[in-house]
Amino acid sequence: MKTVILPWLLTVVLLAGAWALVKITLPVGSAQEPFVTAAELGEEAFARNFAVTVTEVHAARTVIDSEGWSAEGTWLVVDLEAAAQVKQEGTSLRVATLTIGERTFSATDRGATFYREGLVTGVPRSGSLAFEIPDDVLGEHATLRLGATGNPVLDGVIEMRIDLAALPVDSEVTLQENGWAR
């Protein structure tokens, strides 16, 4: 009887151990994931080499910049202040994405926006990011992701959750002029 039960019992124990190992093992590539810092509206958030404060979030049908450029559509405008923390050389806001569901949108580089704007060590600069989004996502939640390097692998990124349904849709929003924060 021992010779019949012992192999089955050992098999069950090994299968349970394998199942537990699969459950606790990190996914492939997770060792290369960026270090994420959660941000809240109006609060300063820090990543490895930069700090960001999101000051306002707007939804709009038209965006206008200080140089006269404008565009119609459905836009999410994020006003922010950002500064480098350690090294100024080569530090700029190079990652600016908005994820809604399974879709990811990059900040527009049209007009005078803060996208790819150089950051100064310890001295915040301000401006706006603009994301052109489909009209059908205004009732959903979004995740804003900001990073100071083009490749956020093993770097720090700042993420902020945005409830798009809670935002009133303005007919027109003017992008902040890029400059020194007040």
Image: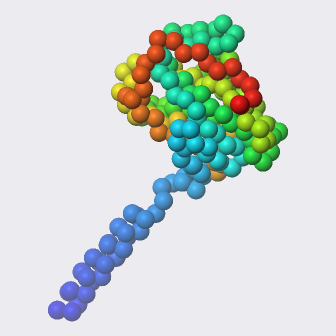
Snapshot quadrant of residue 11: bottom left
Residue 57 appears at what percent x and percent y? Answer: 52, 28
Task: Say left or right for 14 vs 147.
Answer: left
- Judging depth in this view, the residue of 6 and 126 nearest the camera is 126
Number of marks present in the image shown: 0
Q: Is residue 122 left or right of residue 56?
A: right
- Above or below 60: residue 163: below
Residue at image location 62% in from the left, 25% down from the top: 128
In the image, farthest residue toward the front: 182
Instruction: Look at the image and tell me whether residue 106 can be seen.
Output: no
Location of residue 20 in the rendering, given as x and y in whole percent from the top left corner: 37, 69
Residue 135 visible in the snapshot: yes
Q: Is residue 85 left or right of residue 14?
A: right
Image height check: is 25 above or below 10?
A: above
Q: 2 above or below 65?
A: below
* Residue 119 position by quadrant: top right
Q: Which residue, as the protein is rendered here, is positioned at the far left?
A: 1
Residue at the extreme right of the image, as rendered: 89
Q: Which residue sits at x=40%, y=64%? A: 22
The picture places residue 34, in percent across and down from the top left corner, at 60, 49
Query: Residue 134 at what x, y percent from top left?
Result: 43, 20
In-front residue for pair 97/113: 113
Q: Residue at x 46, y 35 (%)?
A: 162
The quadrant of the rendering that contains the C terminus is top right
